[in-house]
């Protein structure tokens, strides 16, 4: 991984990495750490496989020049296997891939839903190191699924978390709206369920925003077209996963549908946003 492995602009080389540490994140998620000094930008992802079936894009949640980590939520067979890995197990990684978040000067509001909070940690670290004010909203349907709170608190920023089964039972979007009514925010950065980001977009009026998208990925490097969005053909693995307001506003599939491995449309189920 890293610049030296680039071929024709694409990072094609696979690297087998030993897991050196596993941090449980509540009952349904885990962070896997590797020894790696690769240069990764906030929002970028790796293509990950354990050679037992499939390869998946996973965002980088931690990178400090010595350790690199991914944080995985148990959603199915593949992610379930990853969550059960132990120190000493190996994974094969390609990347990092994709267009990262672009830090904007001024007060930043970061909104994460579920495991979407993972890529926002790297962004928060960078924004704090640049000296800007940073407010983070971490939301989940149930409080047991709120992850990485300790990491954000450790950065000394304004950290808020909310779930729909405790406290004021606010969605992350409702909490973000409350913050936006009181603070002068320069840019909103979000990652999480697409319906959460769609609900967030509707309250942002003219504010600049950057959203991190998930689409079905096969190659991860812009060749197969499986992650292309309608009608622009924006590839989430290359032009994304982070898209800015101007790009998002051109999409007709945003908040409506994504595609599965065959290219068939999978419509998002309308339910209260997390
Ligand atoms: C840019 C990007 C970053 C991501 N970052 C993270 C992360 O940090 N942590 C995390 O837990 N998950 C992340 N995901 C989701 C992850 O890639 C898997 O979708 C998820 O782990 C479920 O896989 P599964 O096979 O266990 O579940 P399954 O039950 O097989 O699938 C559950 C869902 O995952 C989707 N999915 C399955 N295969 C793929 C694929 N190849 N590409 C995209 N979606 C797929 C399915 O369409 C389905 O909606 C990210 C996805 C993208 C596109
Ligand atoms: S996953 Fe192949 S073009 Fe994006």
Image (cartoon, helix red, strand yellow):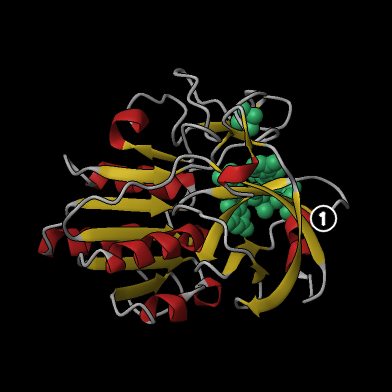
| Corner quadrant of residue 128 | bottom left
- Name which residue lies at 38% across and 59% down: 123
- Name which residue lies at 51% across and 40% down: 98
- Name which residue lies at 64% across and 78% down: 23
Whether residue 232 is visible here, answered yes or no, is yes
Horizontal arrangement in the rendering, residue 36 relative to residue 250 (left or right): right
Which x, y percent locates residue 217?
65, 36
Q: Is residue 118 above or below residue 272?
A: below
Horizontal arrangement in the rendering, residue 184 relative to residue 30 (left or right): left
* Ligand 2 quadrant assignment: top right
Q: Is residue 70 above or below residue 24?
A: above
Q: Secondary structure at mark 1?
A: loop
Count neighbours of disc 1 (C-alpha within 10 A) and say few if under 14, some if 14 to 19, many if 20 or more.
Answer: some
- Name which residue lies at 51% across and 48% down: 44
Whether residue 96 is visible here, answered yes or no, is no
| Corner quadrant of residue 91 | bottom right
Q: Is residue 158 above or below residue 113?
A: below
Which x, y percent locates residue 249?
32, 29
Q: Is residue 128 above or below residue 268?
A: below
273 and 56: which is toward the camera: 56
Which x, y percent locates residue 274?
43, 58
Q: Which residue in the structure is indicated by mark 1? A: 50
Which x, y percent locates residue 92?
77, 53
């Amino acid at each position: 991984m890293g610049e030296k492995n680039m071929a024709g602009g694409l990072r094609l080389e696979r690297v087998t990495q030993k897991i050196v540490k596993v941090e449980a994140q509540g009952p349904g998620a885990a962070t896997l750490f590797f020894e790696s000094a690769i240069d990764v930008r906030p929002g970028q992802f790796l293509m990950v496989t354990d050679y037992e079936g499939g390869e998946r894009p996973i965002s980088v949640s931690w990178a400090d020049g010595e350790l690199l980590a991914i944080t995985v939520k148990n959603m199915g067979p593949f992610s379930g296997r990853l969550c059960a890995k132990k120190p000493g197990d190996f994974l094969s990684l390609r990347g990092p891939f994709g267009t990262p978040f672009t830090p904007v000067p001024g007060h930043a509001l970061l909104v994460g839903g579920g495991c979407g909070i993972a890529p926002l940690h790297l962004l928060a670290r960078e924004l704090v190191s640049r000296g800007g004010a940073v407010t983070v909203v971490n939301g989940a349907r149930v409080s047991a699924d709120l992850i990485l709170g300790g990491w954000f608190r450790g950065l000394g920023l304004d950290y808020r978390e909310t779930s729909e089964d405790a406290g004021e039972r606010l969605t992350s979007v409702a909490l973000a709206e409350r913050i936006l009514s009181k603070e002068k925010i320069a840019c909103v950065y979000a990652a999480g369920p697409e319906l959460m980001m769609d609900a967030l977009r509707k309250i942002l009026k003219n504010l600049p925003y950057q959203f991190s998208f998930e689409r079905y990925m096969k190659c991860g490097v812009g060749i197969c077209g499986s992650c292309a969005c309608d009608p622009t053909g924006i590839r989430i693995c290359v032009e994304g996963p982070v898209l800015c307001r101007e790009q998002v506003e051109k999409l007709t599939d945003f908040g409506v549908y994504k595609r599965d491995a065959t290219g068939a449309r999978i419509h998002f189920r309308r339910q209260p946003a997390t």
